[in-house]
Image (cartoon, rainbow, N blue to C red):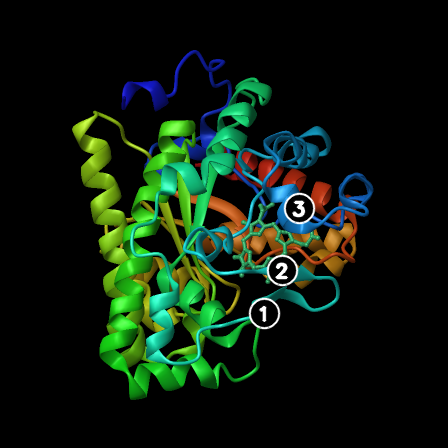
Amino acid sequence: EKCLHLPKDFPQLKNDTFLRAARGEQTQHVPVWCMRQAGRYLPEFREFRAGKDFFDTCRSPEACCELTLQPLRRFDFDASIIFSDILVVPQAMGMEVQMVPGKGPTFPDPLKDPEDLQRLKTKVDVQKELDYVFKAITLTRHKIEGKVPLIGFTGAPWTLMSYMIEGSGSKTFSKVKSWLYRYPEVSHMLLKRLTDVIVDYLLGQVAAGAQALQVFESHAGILGPVEFKAFCLPYLRDIARRVKDQLKETGQDVPMIVFAKDAHYGLEDLSQSYYDVVSLDWTIDPRLAREQTGGKVSLQGNMDPCALYAPKERISEIVKTMLEGFGTQRYIANLGHGMYPDMDPESVAAFVEAVHKHSRQMNKQQ
Ligand SMILES: Cc1c2[nH]c(c1CCC(=O)O)Cc1[nH]c(c(CCC(=O)O)c1C)Cc1[nH]c(c(CCC(=O)O)c1C)Cc1[nH]c(c(C)c1CCC(=O)O)C2
């Protein structure tokens, strides 16, 4: 039963720089990719998505494969990330989510009271409910022809809980935060249930062909250090520990990346949480991040996405300073968060070129 899902006969990987950096091995150049590298800033993306519902697109393995490959045709990225969304997990648990143009993800019927947990499926058949994501990953692993590794991903429990209760993005996140203060035990129950689904989901993605995994805790920063330690960190740790343990049993080692946006107070803890890579937003100084993570993990990030609005020469300078801060080893260049729709593809090319060029030069000088 299990071996039916094991990756098999995929094309040989030609560029393992990203995986090497993630595992802390030497690299000739710093690998680079961008969060949201498949997105509306690409005219071919807008054309392909035109008139189609967002989650219908997510449920089509062929569409996900095409959208994942689009940025690789343009840019010399060292990794790709499967086109999907973090909100497919609440959907798999029985919640309705719509992508409303101009407004973003919206839950018509968010969780309001603790009793609403009863609306969630008690047993989630992840293999069945998220089969379309697994199919997308397997198809993409073939179509990518070993050019670069394919990253799978998930939202982290707290970030998913916040969408399930807020029903959309929010300025204050006061609805979901009120749960933490009024119903801490129910909150932990929900976070635990999300964790269980997420572990199965990540293992399913590896079985389907994902070569690395990123966990997005995009809403970490709305919590203070005490609540972060109580409601984020334990679940992030649990996810990595359980996924790693299960993979070890089948002799697999898949690098795991954690991105807890704006949780600079949590960097030391995150570096001791079974993840191979800690991904950083732009508010943290690279040298400080190295100090706080003490060489125990690789780092990823963290150029301010808005630096892509700068002229090419300026982007190159910003990249050089960033590389000097992080150093060229145990490092994966990326943005501190996703790209925006109005960004110029030419700037992305400049970013990627600058990372490759400067890091090769710096490696030669050492
Ligand atoms: C919070 C979050 C979501 N989704 C995701 C996160 C975590 C990362 C982060 O912090 O940004 C994760 C995500 N969403 C998407 C990817 C695909 C892979 C990639 O990075 O290229 C990934 C990794 C595609 C997408 N997901 C979405 C788009 C844009 C909408 C579209 O294509 O029509 C894409 C390319 C939609 C989405 N989905 C979500 C939001 C907030 C939005 C934006 C809504 C808007 O801008 O109107 C929820």
| Mark 3 / mark 2, whichever is N-terminal | 2
Give whichever of 298, 67 is nearer the camera. Answer: 67
| Amino acid of disc 2 | Gln
Callouts 3 and 2 close, C-beta under 8 Å: no
Residue indicated by mark 2 = 98
Give whichever of 253, 186 is nearer the camera. Answer: 186
- Find residue 169 and report its horizontal and vertical position in percent: 57, 72
Q: Identify the disc placed on residue 108.
A: 1
Q: Which corner quadrant holds the N terminus?
A: top left
Q: Is residue 213 left or right of residue 42?
A: left
Q: Identify the disc placed on residue 54.
A: none
Q: What residue is shown at x 81% (from left), y 47% (from top)?
A: 51
Q: Is residue 165 left or right of residue 5?
A: right
| Mark 3 / mark 1, whichever is N-terminal | 1
Secondary structure of the residue carrying numbered label 2: strand
Q: Which quadrant does ligand 1 occupy?
A: bottom right
Secondary structure of the residue carrying numbered label 1: loop
- Find residue 127 and report its horizontal and vertical position in percent: 38, 37
Q: Is residue 65 visible?
A: yes
Give whichever of 14, 260 is nearer the camera. Answer: 260
Q: What residue is shown at x 45% (from left), y 41% (from top)?
A: 130
Residue indicated by mark 3 = 351
Q: Is residue 26 visible?
A: no
Q: Tell me if the residue at label 1 has its CB under 8 Å from ligand 1.
A: no
Q: What residue is shown at x 32% (from left), y 81% (from top)?
A: 180
| Amino acid of disc 3 | Phe
Q: Is residue 242 left or right of residue 171?
A: left
Callouts 1 and 2 close, C-beta under 8 Å: yes
